Image: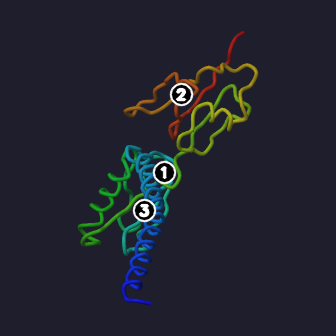
Amino acid sequence: MTLKRVGYSLLRLISLSIAVAYVWVLPVQAMDEATEKTNSSTQLGYKLGSGDQIKITVFNQQDLSGDYTVSGAGHLALPLIGEVIVKDLTTKQVEEAIANKLKPDYLLNPRVSVQVLNFRPFYILGEVKEPKSYPYVDGMTYLNAVAIAGGFTYRAKEDHVIVTREINHQKTEIRMNMEDKVQPGDIIHIEERFF
């Protein structure tokens, strides 16, 4: 085999390796970016409330890291620093609040990460077959929520729902279409029709 042929074969092998790597890495990278966008869009503007389960990671501090549930009062009880008010805060704001409490006395430069593990449940009442609380699933519509609750009873108004939701610290009733999206903590009422 001549030196020219060896060089040509080596060049083909390198080109083929690069092409395979490109085909393999690009879809994986795109999938990772899509997952990251979905997770961040779900949690970006989401404000924590009672019943949310979150994971707190304080880097290199296993004793301070763990899974927590937001209390009915909207607090978390953490080791060393005690209670932290998290109700109506985003995960980014909670990270900052925990880091600020750790900084002066416990850690020099704390790095804190907060992730929502399970969103607070939604409640469905009224004219459904199984009225109770159910785990929230991202992207669920009110029609999906009714299906999870066993479907409508024969007396149900099926074209809309009445939702009680906390807006600016006040419980507000809103009429929603069946294709609108459920929010964590929604109290969904299926009204009775009178004919």
SS of the residue under disc 1: loop
Local packing at callout 3 (Cα closer than 10 Å; few below 14, some 14-19, many 20+) is many
Give how far apart the Cα atoms at labels 2 and 3 are.
31 Å
Tell me the residue at 73%/19% (across/down).
155
Q: x, y percentage for residue 191?
A: 64, 21
Image quadrant where residue 1 sits: bottom left
Height in image: 58 above or below 31? below
| First in sequence: mark 2 vs mark 1 | 1
Q: Are marks 3 and 1 in contact (CB under 8 Å)?
A: no
Tell me the residue at 43%/47% (across/down).
48
Relative horizontal placement of residue 122, taking residue 108 as reference (left or right): right
Q: Nearer the viewer, residue 7 or 176?
A: 7
Q: x, y percentage for residue 186?
A: 53, 35
Local packing at callout 1 (Cα closer than 10 Å; few below 14, some 14-19, many 20+) is some
Q: Nearer the viewer, residue 30 or 152?
A: 30
Give how far apart the Cα atoms at labels 3 and 1 are.
15 Å
Q: Residue furthest right?
A: 154
Give the amino acid at mark 2: Val
Q: Are marks 2 and 3 in contact (CB under 8 Å)?
A: no
SS of the residue under disc 3: strand
Image quadrant where residue 33 sits: bottom left
Tell me the residue at 41%/63% (across/down).
78
Q: Residue furthest front?
A: 2
Residue occupied by mark 1: 71
Give the amino acid at mark 3: Ile
Residue occupied by mark 3: 56
Residue occupied by mark 2: 163
